[in-house]
Amino acid sequence: MANFLCCIAWFLVLWFVSFFVAGFCAWIYILLYPLSMCISALTVSFYLTSC
């Protein structure tokens, strides 16, 4: 029974931590996406053609 409760506790901890990580990544994406029109190093095609 204790193992099951520990599993539920870890699930909840990882669930809430993942929301903060996803929010941080979305915030960075929202800030950098408009700048990709001005800075070519922020586009995917820059990395694909440099190989």
Image (tube, rainbow, N blue to C red):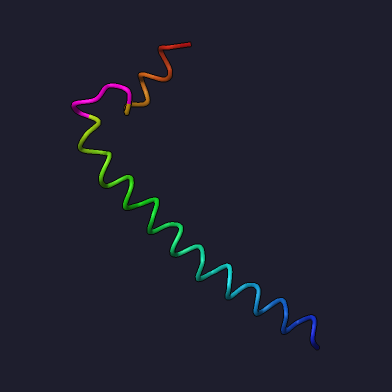
**What secondary structure predominates along the stretch shown in magenta?**
helix
Q: Residue 18: x, y in percent?
A: 50, 62
Q: Residue 46: x, y in percent?
A: 36, 18
What residue is rendered at 65% in x and 79% in y? 9
Q: Residue 7: x, y in percent?
A: 71, 76
What residue is rendered at 66% in x and 79% in y? 8
What residue is rendered at 51% in x and 66% in y? 17
What residue is rendered at 43% in x and 12% in y? 50
| Residue ranking furthest to the bottom | 1
Relative horizontal placement of residue 49, taking residue 34 as reference (left or right): right
From what the image shows, is residue 2 above or below residue 40? below
Q: Which segment is the magenta one?
A: 37-41
Relative horizontal placement of residue 15, taking residue 6 as reference (left or right): left
Nearer the observer, 15 or 32: 32
Residue 34 lies in the magenta stretch: no
Q: Residue 34: x, y in percent?
A: 20, 38
From what the image shows, is residue 17 above or below residue 4? above
